[in-house]
Image: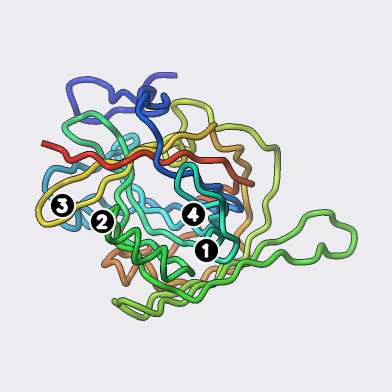
Amino acid sequence: MLPEPTGLPGPIDRDTPRVRPVRPAVMRQDWTFLLFLHWEVPAERIRPLLPPGLELDLYQGKAYVGLVPFTMSGVRPIGVPAIPFLSRFHETNVRTYVHVEGRDPGVWFFSLDAANPLAVVTARAWFHLPYHHARMRLSHESPGSGTTTRGISYSSERLWPGPKPASCTIQCVPKGPIAPATAGTLEHFLAERYLLYASHRGRLYRGQVHHTPYPLQSADVTTLEESLLSAAGLPRPDVPPLAHFSQGVCVEVFPLTILP
């Protein structure tokens, strides 16, 4: 499959960020019950919200915004045991996809809502990410008569800091075969991201994570009410999202580096 057009002199290298860095990791985390919801959004509506130095990463000329609820567990620094009431909490992020001058494709977060106030304060201070404390819930529905499929419900309501309202109520039913996304596909472009960017006091930072490829499957979204995109200044198209579900991955987190 040919690489997607980017409008740049050559294709973006999407393989190198997936290689585990040789430097030591600083944290371990497990990401589970991930629901990836994506909409195509006009690039001109997203670009003004990006910091200087970042450019939109496009797939076949199109820009995407994602809403991703999931559960974090086993969150701890390297060499420190997980503490149940601190190391497990739900999270929801609003994101888009970026690169720096045609290289290092990654994620730009407009917001990350989490149900752990300590994690919010720590991530804001150490990783310069726009975390918000939220009241959140994730539950598994009992399978209906004659089916073995279990629905999953996510809910989130932002508490601090603003802007508010910023909430979501989502119900989905995973379906179909489970497999990693194929390189070159839209699913791979959206899900397989190993770099993140942050901005603080006019400086741009890059972080990296490492994990095995997501085991992905399709999902039917049966309920979707949310105001997180509008709180981030983003329009949500009045069309169903592209939806994928993953049971999860084990993650290593590496320290931020300052970009020149």
Answer whether labels 4 and 3 touch (C-beta < 8 Å): no
Instruction: Count neighbours of disc 4 (C-alpha within 10 A) and say few if under 14, some if 14 to 19, many if 20 or more.
Output: many
Residue occupied by mark 4: 37
Residue at 44% across / 74% down in the picture? 134
- Distance Cα–Cα, label 3 vs label 1: 32 Å
Q: Earlier in the sequence, mark 2 or mark 1?
A: 1
Return the disc, 3 or 1, that comes first in the chain's sequence.
Answer: 3
Asked whether the residues under the numbered discs 4 and 2 touch, taking CB atoms below 8 Å apart as contact, a structural biologist would say no
Label 2 sits on what residue type?
His
Asked whether the beta carbons under mark 2 and mark 1 sit within 8 Å of each other, the answer is no
Distance of label 2 from label 1 (alpha carbons)? 20 Å
Q: Position of residue 153 (x, y in %)?
A: 63, 67
- Mark 2 packing: few (<14 Cα in 10 Å), some, or many (20+)? some
Which comes sooner in the sequence, label 4 or label 3? 4
Task: List x then y, in percent, for residue 221.
Answer: 60, 60
Asked if 149 appears above or below 251 in the picture, the reply is below
Q: Give the label, 2 or 1, closer to the camera.
A: 1
Mark 2–mark 3 Cα distance, whole angstroms, equals 13 Å
Residue located 59% across and 69% down the image:
223
Q: According to the image, label 3 marks what residue?
A: 51
Which amino acid lies under the numbered mark 1 shown in the image of this protein? Leu
Looking at the image, is mark 1 or mark 4 earlier in the sequence? 4
Q: Identify the element where label 1 is drawn.
A: helix
- Of helix, strand and loop, which one carries label 3? loop
Q: CA distance from mark 4 to mark 2?
A: 24 Å
Tell whether 191 sits left or right of 35. Answer: left
Residue for badge 1: 86
Task: Judge left or right: residue 42 versus residue 139.
Answer: left
Q: Sequence-wise, which precedes: disc 2 or disc 3?
A: 3
To which residue does mark 2 refer? Answer: 128
Of the two numbered discs 4 and 3 in the rendering, the one whose residue sits closer to the viewer: 3
What amino acid type is highlighted by mark number 4?
Leu
